[in-house]
Image: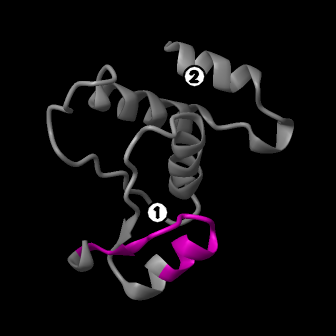
């Protein structure tokens, strides 16, 4: 487990604990990203899942803990992008407007 995940877990309050699946997603994103200063193997990491599974929480957590990462929030519809912005995902857009 990376230092990022270990340190993040130690610093959490009970209301912001991540599930095992969310931690697995963070690990997958960091693995995809690779070491700082390198380019990822692929340009895009898609985080998908049904409503209420914590996708927004995962991305906000990554942005908070790794502010140097470029995180773009995109959704299929304008309504969904608006919901993301209301939840603190600054700059969320529709996929076709990226």
Q: Quadrant of residue 68?
A: top left
For disc 1, the marked residue is 50
How many numbered marks are there?
2
Q: Report the span colored magenta.
A: 82-95
Name which residue lies at 46% across and 79% down.
80
Secondary structure under tag 2 reads: helix
Name which residue lies at 31% across and 19% down.
35
| In the displayed structure image, the side of residue 46 where residue 63 appears, left or right | right
> Which is in the foreground here, disc 2 or disc 1?
2
Q: Position of residue 71 (x, y in %)?
A: 40, 51
Above or below for 76 versus 60: below
| In the displayed structure image, the side of residue 48 where residue 56 appears, left or right | right
* Residue 50 within the magenta-colored segment of the rendering: no
Q: Spatial distance from mark 2 to mark 1, Cα to Cα?
A: 24 Å
Secondary structure under tag 1 reads: loop
Name which residue lies at 55% across and 13% down.
3
Which comes before the other along the chain, label 2 or label 1? 2
For disc 2, the marked residue is 5
Name which residue lies at 66% across and 38% down.
18
Q: Quadrant of residue 92?
A: bottom left
Q: Position of residue 46 (x, y in %)?
A: 29, 52
Above or below for 96 versus 59: below
Above or below for 88 versus 68: below
Q: Quadrant of residue 48?
A: bottom left
- Colour mode? one colour
* Quarter of the rendering occupied by the C terminus: bottom left
Query: Closest to the observer: 52 or 58?
Result: 58
* Residue 86 within the magenta-colored segment of the rendering: yes
């Amino acid at each position: 487990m990376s230092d990022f995940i270990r340190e993040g877990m130690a610093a959490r309050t009970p209301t912001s604990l991540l599930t095992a699946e969310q931690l697995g997603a963070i690990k997958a994103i960091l693995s995809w990203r690779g070491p700082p200063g390198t380019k990822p193997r692929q340009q895009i990491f898609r985080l998908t899942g049904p409503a209420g599974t914590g996708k927004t929480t995962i991305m906000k957590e990554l942005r908070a803990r790794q502010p140097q990462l470029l995180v773009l929030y995109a959704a299929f519809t304008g309504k969904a992008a608006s919901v993301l912005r209301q939840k603190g995902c600054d700059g969320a857009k529709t996929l076709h407007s990226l």
